[in-house]
Amino acid sequence: MANTTKRKSRYDADAIGKDDYVPRLKFEHDAINGALMPLDATARRIEQSFGVGRVQELAGPDMAAKFQAAKAKLDVALEDNNVELVIRRAKVLNAGWLALEKAAIEAGHQPAPPEIWHAHAPAEDGKPEIEFVIARDNSDATLAQTTKPVYTVEEIARIVRAWRSAFDAHAVKQHWPQAEVIRVDGDEVFDDEIPF
């Protein structure tokens, strides 16, 4: 999601010692993540239906300004590690998402049908941000009404099949079906000798 603040925590071992690492005590981390879960779910649902950033574009300047201000205030609360303020700001921003969605629908803009999902991969590890649309099949692809690339579920299955033959992610998914791929680092295959 384009509007989600990237958070570093005690679980981000690769971030320790870097400028954007924010160490948190266990209770603070869990309370903040708990407060952000409903907000992230609302934002994800709306962006999957309308597209990333689309409801903000459809809002008038006044509503868009209030939304951006609420987001900035939440970012400050997160940076300050202020649990109570994060909870308050998350509630306000959640209400902002719902207000943007309602305004878009009242203005005649409709969310994509359930067969269409707007997908977004943020810029990371030197790779650019990408946006595309996922459709159940070719007959649903015409419902997308977008200039973004449209992939069907079958096309994605083919991409995954080709990809998993080159990486070990499939073996991990077979062993731990609920595991989530959050980042792919490079495309090199390691075949190092084990030193012991």
Image: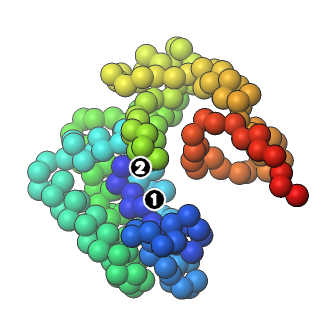
Does residue 11 sit above or below 150 in this rendering?
below
Disc 2 packing (10 Å; few <14; some 14–19; many ≥20): some
Q: CA distance from mark 1 to mark 2?
A: 9 Å
Q: Percent x, y for residue 154?
A: 63, 20
Q: Is residue 166 left or right of residue 25?
A: right
Q: Is residue 154 left or right of residue 80?
A: right
Q: Residue at x 33, y 35 (%)?
A: 110
Q: Residue at x 25, y 66 (%)?
A: 72
Does residue 15 sit above or below 1 in this rendering?
below
Q: Quadrant of residue 25?
A: bottom right
Q: Percent x, y for residue 153?
A: 60, 25
Of 50 and 180, the residue lying toward us: 180
Q: Nearer the viewer, mark 1 or mark 2?
A: 2
Indicate the amino acid at tag 1.
Asp
The dot on residue 93 is none
Q: Quadrant of residue 95?
A: bottom left
Residue lying furthest left: 61
Would you name the residue on which mark 2 appears? 1
Q: Mark 1 and mark 2 in contact? Answer it, CB < 8 Å.
A: yes
Report the number of numbered marks. Answer: 2
